[in-house]
Amino acid sequence: MAATGERTAPGAVFSEAGELVNKVLIDLSQPIEPEMTVFPGDPKPHFRPADGVEEPWWVAEIKIGSATGTHFDCPSHLLPGGKTVDKYPLARFILPGIVLPVPDLKDDHAISEAQISNGLKNLPEGDAVLIQTDWDRYWKTERYLRHPCLSPEAVWKLVGSKASLVGIDALNVDSTVQATDHVHRVLFERDILTLENLTNLNRLQPGKVYQFSFLPLRWVGLDASPIRAVAW
Amino acid sequence: MTTYFDLSQPLQPGMTIFPGDPTPSFRPADGVEQPWRVADLRLGTHTGTHIDSVSHYFPGGKNVDQYPISRFILPGIVLPVPDLIEDQAITVEQISDRLKKLPEGGALLIQTEWDQYWNTDRYLHHPYLSPEAVLQLVGSKASLVGIDALNVDSTVQATNHVHHLLLEKEILIVENLTHLSNLQPGRVYQFSFLPLRLAGMDGSPIRAVAW
């Protein structure tokens, strides 16, 4: 017997004044599935029906890497003794921010300071900056690994902008094919979090301030977490 | 400044799980080069604070990735049911008054305080919803029912009437919530119960938050 009922929820969100307002919620997350793109060498996602679960119930066992799909990285992802994902207040993960498009990028292109500096003007301190490369169109293809990355000068510009979080719609804020780590290193040393494998950033207006939810699961002592990234 | 309330149990090896569910394990991933650190995670879809979709109980029912995200970010209320004993069936009388405050399509979170027994054997002997109480919820405006206990059904009696009646009407279920006592009873809060975008899965661990 299949479920027959229909329910809807308003998807409502509170305004600053505490009033309930209806907003459109936009999903910025890639699906998590066995054949998805993962970082080379990371665990491959695997789902199977759990043993020992009785009829009619269905429970699955999932095996995933902490940095699989749309995910958060914390300083311990790179820096020994760095903070883990459970050490941050929730306000670090539910926050305002902007999308900053960088058009016309090529394979393994290092995004320059000049390509982001205009878009960073007037960014309120502590907000999120999401770099839109449109590389999510290559998800699940080999080209997805040859995504653009941030140049050292662009990273310093981001540090100077006082962003608390830097996200990207690509596999990595560093270069994957050159195996660089300067972007993660400079950001993590200043406790700026990184968010990778976003998608659908082109559904948001460039420069407009949105509210984002990037809540990690409450893993104890882990370096990263898959997330459901949402904007409204 | 908005105050955010964390309603999620920590995920770690040795945590309380449903009897028979996969045991969570975390270990450093093989094949990851220095200096990077990545963990290999194994867990059940219903481990820790989690959401159930219809396919958890009804074969062929909707999976967790088949709902609009508006089903997971929604207003709702906490409904405390005080003085419960082990495996007690919550009655209609214990919930009916406060249900009137529920917003249309909102989340109703039953506060049993059983989260105080998390990681003890007593956590399995939690209260649950009687058939009459569930029918009252089905007749209400709720689109989601949550509880600060292992299960909305009775675990020790292995009942399934609560999941059956709620999921049949596409009312989603959130279990293993905690710290509901930090929220004021009956006041409307904003909740986020967003699942991971797990393709074709019956449920998902979540980070449950109120503000």
Image: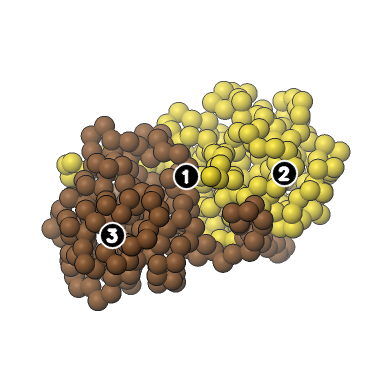
Cα separation, mark 3 vs mark 1, equals: 25 Å
SS for dot 3: loop
Q: Badge 3 is on which residue? A: A171
**Mark identifier at residue A91:** 1
SS for dot 2: loop
Taking the view exactly as shown, the residue that stands out farthest to the front is A122
Label 1: how many residues lie within 10 Å, few (<14), some (14-19) or many (20+)? some
Please tell me whether residue A55 is drawn above or below residue B82 in the rendered image. below
Q: In front here: B9 or A16?
A: A16
**Going from the N terminus, do you reach mark 3 or mark 1 first?**
1
SS for dot 1: helix
| Foreground label between 2 and 3 | 2
Q: Quadrant of residue B127?
A: top right
Label 3: how many residues lie within 10 Å, few (<14), some (14-19) or many (20+)? many
Q: Disc 3 residue type?
A: Leu
Label 2: how many residues lie within 10 Å, few (<14), some (14-19) or many (20+)? few
Q: Badge 2 is on which residue? A: B187
Taking the view exactly as shown, the residue that stands out farthest to the bottom is A104
Relative placement, left or right, of B135 versus A150 is right
Q: Disc 2 residue type?
A: Arg
Label 3 lies in what chain? Answer: A
Q: Disc 1 residue type?
A: Ala
Label 2 lies in what chain? Answer: B
Q: Are marks 2 and 1 in contact (CB under 8 Å)?
A: no
Disc 2 with disc 1 on a shared chain: no
Label 1 lies in what chain? Answer: A
Q: Which chain is yellow?
A: B
Question: What residue lies at 29% left-to-right and 49% top-to-bottom?
Answer: A43
- Chain A's colour? brown
| Foreground label between 3 and 1 | 1
